[in-house]
Amino acid sequence: MIMLIRPFPAPLDTLFEWQTGDHITHLDGRPIEDILDLYYYTPESKVTTLNIQRKTGETLRVELDPGDIDVVTGCFAPMEFKTCACDCVFCFIDQNPAGMRDQIYVKDEDYRFSFLYGNYITLTSLGKRGLKRIIEQGMSPLYVSVHATDIDVRTRMLGIKRRIDVMAILTELVAAGIEIHTQVVLCPGWNEGPILEKTFRDLLTLGAPVTEEESPFTAVCERGHGYEGAGEIPEYEDIEEAGNSAQGGIKSLAIVPVGLSSHRDGLTKLESVSPNLAREAIDQVASWQKIAKKELGYSFVYLSDEFYLMAEQPFPPAEQYDDFWQIDNAIGLSVRLRDTWREELEWRAEDGELPIRPLTVLTGQLAAEAWLREFTPVLTAAKAPDVQIVGVENRFYGNSVTVAGLLGGQDLRRALLELPAEPKRTVVLSQRVINSDGLTLDGMCLEDIAQDQPHRVVVGEEDGFIDFWRDLG
C-alpha cells in the first residue's frame, strides 16, 4: 500500500477529494506495494482505477488520468528502507560513535533504493519475490556489494548463516538484461590476493561488452545518492528513463579499502590496507585491466583514489576510468576534477575571468594530499589566486579515517578556530560534509561551525568549483 502524507492542492476528480492518510491499495485490481508498482503498472494512454482505503476503514474507487500521476506521487509518504540482516565484519555503521541521529545507524538492504539512488546491496535479503520483481520491472542498473565470489569467504565476511551463491543470482539478473555495478571492500587477511583475483575473474565472465550505441551514463550523485534530493520521490519520466538506459551485464567492479574508525570495541579485529598492499593491488588491477580490455573493450575493474595516494603512485590517465561509472566510490574523482578544472581555468583565462579571491580549503587529510599533488599545480599553472589547503584531523571517528565525507562539524570548527584571525579569509568546506538537510554527521549546521569567528565560511562544489570560486567575487 502507498500512503498519502498530505492532501493534493486541488482534487483530481470532482467527485473525490484526496485526504491525508489515504492508502492506495490496488491499481486496476492489482495489489500495489509502493510507488514503483504504481509507475510500472499505470497504463500510458488510458484512465486507471485506484482502490483507496481511508483511515476510517472506508474503501473507495477513483479514476486517475495517467497525466496526473506525478501530482499524486508528490503527496506520497517516502518509501521506507528494507533493512540489512547481515553482520559484516567491516560494516561502517557498526563503527559509528554513540549519540548520533537515528538515521545514521540505519543499515539498508533495499533493491529499490539500489535502482533509484545507487545504494549498494548484498542481495542476501532479495528472495525469489524480489528477484522476480527486479526482472519483471527492469530495475536497471543495480549496485551490488560482492566482496568475494568465493561462497565460504563471502559468508564469513557478511556474517550470515545461509550460504548464498552471489554468482548464481548475478547470472540470473544479467540473463534478464539487468546492468550491474559491483563493489569489493578490500579487507587484509580476508579477500585480497588469490580471493580477489577469483572475484575479478568470476565477475568478468558476466561482463557487459561495449556496444556501438552506448547509453549516456548518469552518475549516482546526479540521481540523488547522498546529495540534495536523495530519498525524494522521483518523477515517472526519471524512473522510466533509468529503467531503459542500461544493458545486461556486469559493467564495473570497484575496489575500495576497508574503513576503520576508532569505535570498534567488540568488533572483529581488522587491519587497514597498508601502502605495500596498495601497491600490490595497483599492480594486480593494471594487469587485470589489460585482460578486461581484450575481452570487453574497456577497463572494467577500478581502484579507488585512496590506493594511489597511499602508495604514492600516479593516477592512471582519465581514459583508463572509461565513463567514470564508480565516481561515487571516489574512483577517478581526483583525475576527473583535476582535468575538468584545468579545462575550465583555460576557458576562464581566455575570457579574462579567472577567480580573484584567495581561498582556504578545509578538507580530509586524504583529500588534502590530492589537492597538493593534483590540484594545486593546475591552479598555479593557470595563475589562479593562492589556495591554502588544511588537512583536518578526524577526531570524531579517529585519525585513521581520512576521507573528507566523514569529517564531523566539531573537527571542522576546531580547524577553523585554529586559523589566524588575520587576514580574514574565505574558507571553503567540502560539499560532502553537509547532507541534504544541511547537517554534518555529528548534527552541526554551517552556522554552528562558523559562529563567533572572523572568516567567511562557505560550502563548495566539486565539478563546478571554478565557477563557484569565480562567483565568490
Image: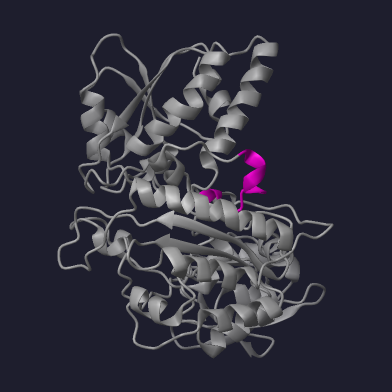
Residue at the image position 67 percent from the left and 76 percent from the top: 174
Does residue 229 appear anywhere in the picture? no
Query: In the figure, 321 relative to 361: above or below?
Result: below
Does residue 96 appear anywhere in the picture? yes
Please say whether residue 326 is one of the residues in the magenta stretch. Answer: yes
Kindly indicate the quadrant of the structure image that contains residue 298.
Answer: bottom right
| Residue 342 at x, y percent in the picture | 61, 24
Query: In the figure, 105 relative to 347: above or below?
Result: below
| Residue 391 at x, y percent in the picture | 32, 31
Colour treatment of the image: one colour
Residue at the image position 44 percent from the left and 33 percent from the top: 370
| Residue 378 at x, y percent in the picture | 55, 21
Left or right placement of residue 66 versus residue 151 in this view: right
Kindly indicate the quadrant of the structure image that contains residue 291.
Answer: bottom right
451 or 151, which lies in front? 151
Residue at the image position 49 percent from the left and 47 percent from the top: 330
Kindly indicate the quadrant of the structure image that contains residue 169.
Answer: bottom right
Left or right placement of residue 398 versus residue 252 in this view: left
Tell me where the magenta segment starts and ends, as one range: 317-329
| Residue 356 at x, y percent in the picture | 51, 11
Picture mark count: 0
213 or 113, which lies in front? 213
Outermost residue on the left side: it is 265
288 or 34, which lies in front? 288
Left or right placement of residue 423 versus residue 115 in this view: left
Left or right placement of residue 108 versus residue 384 in this view: left
Please say whether residue 122 is one of the residues in the magenta stretch. Answer: no
Residue at the image position 62 percent from the left and 31 percent from the top: 340
